[in-house]
């Protein structure tokens, strides 16, 4: 008579779903994330900002979620080494506690190629056993000229890796421009799911229940990515400024450097109200500013981040001259 010994089944490790939100500068990534968190509050969030001063997290101030920021570079090059230990720390906190979140959402910087992030999640064994990549969501502004895809290879790479493409800011674009962009997106990402956000609103279930996609693991090391050539400057405004003065100064810079100045964002204070003002601009325009709720941590110091293609000599001094002058 033969004896058979049944081995104890190995413990199944529960994997945490991970969503990646990508998209070019000013395409509405953080706005989409803000809406998503309203419906999925039990999320841990990692925000990567290219500038040295975090601004995007101010949009999320109403949400009490575990939030980590990676600043001073983008996840495709300068700060990619910071992602692995951050994900390990999040997982250990999840294992040791009462599972304080149900998913992780990573928002890449607007100039990042998402491929290195995918590579980490899929190839690093410890992480791959504990995290489950659900998909890459990429925002694209309807106001973006299709020439941007040729001018900025980062924008092409983001679309190429997308599982879902969300067209945003359709209220700011003509029907002809939307149709032209739609055709270009179909060529760049023919298999991606296509969604449209109307006034920032979108069916959150469509984003959180992405269809599973097959991803082939690369069989060689990730090649060195070329330098993207973007620069950033950060300005601190110690005193409140009338919004009309700052608005005219920023519009002056956007019109003076339409190709080089690709993103403006910041949180500033004005004499009229104690609520800080969120300032955003991109694609050759300054968007309407919006008020943010007051927080105890607010210090009254305004901060502006300006991202340019290449270095624009004297840009900060030029802005300060405009703010001080009588011509604005």
Image: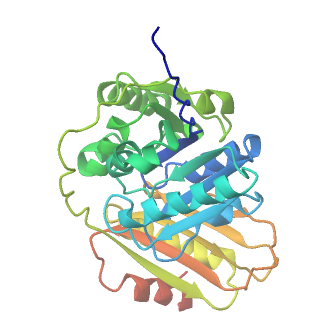
Residue ID at (68%, 37%): 201
- Whether residue 289 appears in this view of the structure is no
Q: Nearer the viewer, residue 223 or 32?
A: 223
- The answer to whether 90 appears left or right of 36 in the picture is left
Numbered disc total: 0
Q: Nearer the viewer, residue 124 or 112?
A: 124
Instruction: Give the image location of residue 316, x and y in percent.
Output: 42, 84
Residue ID at (25%, 66%): 229
Instruction: Give the image location of residue 196, x and y in percent.
Output: 56, 30
Which image quadrant: the C terminus? bottom right
Q: Nearer the viewer, residue 99 or 176?
A: 99
Instruction: Name the residue at the top extreme.
Output: 1
Q: Nearer the viewer, residue 39 or 120?
A: 120
User: From what the image shows, is residue 211 above or below residue 89?
Assistant: above
User: From what the image shows, is residue 80 above or below residue 28?
Assistant: below
Instruction: Give the image location of residue 52, x and y in percent.
Output: 47, 77
- The answer to whether 238 appears left or right of 147 in the picture is right
Residue ID at (75%, 40%): 39
User: From what the image shows, is residue 116 above or below residue 93?
Assistant: above
Instruction: Name the residue at the front extreme.
Output: 1
- Whether residue 85 appears in this view of the structure is yes
User: From what the image shows, is residue 98 above or below residue 244?
Assistant: above
| Type of colouring | rainbow
Instruction: Give the image location of residue 183, x and y in percent.
Output: 36, 25
């Amino acid at each position: 008579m033969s004896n058979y010994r049944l081995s104890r089944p190995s413990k199944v490790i529960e994997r945490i779903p991970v969503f990646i939100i990508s998209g070019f500068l000013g395409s509405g990534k953080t706005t989409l994330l803000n809406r998503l968190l309203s419906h999925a509050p039990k999320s841990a969030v990692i925000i990567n900002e290219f500038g040295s001063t975090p601004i995007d997290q101010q949009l999320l101030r109403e949400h009490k979620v575990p939030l980590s920021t990676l600043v001073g570079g983008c996840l495709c090059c300068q700060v990619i080494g910071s992602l692995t230990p951050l994900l390990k720390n999040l997982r250990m906190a999840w294992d040791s506690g009462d599972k304080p979140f149900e998913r992780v959402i990573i928002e890449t910087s607007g100039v990042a190629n998402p491929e290195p992030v995918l590579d980490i999640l899929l190839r690093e064994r410890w992480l791959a056993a504990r995290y489950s990549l659900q998909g890459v969501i990429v925002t694209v502004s309807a106001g973006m000229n299709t020439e941007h895809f040729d001018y900025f290879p980062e924008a092409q790479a983001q679309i190429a890796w997308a599982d879902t493409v969300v067209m945003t800011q359709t209220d700011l674009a003509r029907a002809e421009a939307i149709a032209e962009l739609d055709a270009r997106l179909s060529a760049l990402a023919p298999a991606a799911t296509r969604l449209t956000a109307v006034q920032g609103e979108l069916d959150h279930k469509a984003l959180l229940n992405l269809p599973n996609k097959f991803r082939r693991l690369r069989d060689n090391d990730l090649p060195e990515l070329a330098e993207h050539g973007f620069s950033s400057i950060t300005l601190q405004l110690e005193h409140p400024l009338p919004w009309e003065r700052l608005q005219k100064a920023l519009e002056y810079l956007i019109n003076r450097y339409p190709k080089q100045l690709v993103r403006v964002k910041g949180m500033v204070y004005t004499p009229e109200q104690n609520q800080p003002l969120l300032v955003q601009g991109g694609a050759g325009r300054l968007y309407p500013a919006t008020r943010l709720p007051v927080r105890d941590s607010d210090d009254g110091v305004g901060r502006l981040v300006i991202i340019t293609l290449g270095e624009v000599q004297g840009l900060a001094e030029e802005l300060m001259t405009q703010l001080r002058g009588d011509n604005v």
